[in-house]
Image (tube, rainbow, N blue to C red):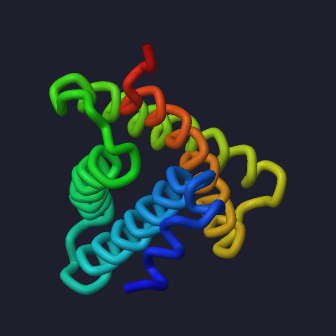
Amino acid sequence: MEKLKKLKDSKLVKKHGEKIRFLLVGGFNTVLDFCIYGLLANIIGVPQVISNIISTTICVTISFILNYKFVWHSEKSIKNTVIGFLAVSFFSAWVVQSVAISVTLAILGENATTNLIAKLVGSATGMITNYFGYKLVFKTRQK
């Protein structure tokens, strides 16, 4: 318990705690998304598009709750943040990630390996977009 308190009080955590929490939540959600998708599509046999819709819906919901409470410690009401959160999430997923994937594949060519690399590049690019977008959504302006 003492080590946890020391870690929490460290300069690194005080300076970058928000980013660290964001990366933890983002990493958790990415792994969860891939696991739910894989379970539904590969084990249960649900069609891929339906599996993706289900997995991303679950993960966006969990992501909102974790970002609202754990990452940003938002004081804004849920009602005042959920629309902005969804707008940032879907813009990032549908526009930013799609562009990053397309550009990566145009540079590397398309095969099974580069498809995975492109997905990773898209996810990383989307995470950066999400960080700055969510910061706007959840942060209360200082007076």
Extreme residue in the right direction? 107
Residue 70 or residue 2, whichever sits in front? 2
Above-or-below relation of 61 to 81? below
Q: Quadrant of residue 29?
A: bottom left
Where's residue 54, x and y in %? 21, 58
Quadrant of image for the N terminus? bottom left
Residue 89 or residue 53, whichever sits in front? 89
- The residue shown at (57%, 39%) is 129
Where's residue 109, x and y in %? 78, 59
Q: Quadrant of residue 132?
A: top right
80 displayed left or right of 124: left
Above-or-below relation of 76 to 68? above
- The residue shown at (62%, 69%) is 116
87 displayed left or right of 106: left
- The residue shown at (83%, 52%) is 107
Where's residue 117, x and y in %? 68, 66
57 displayed left or right of 4: left
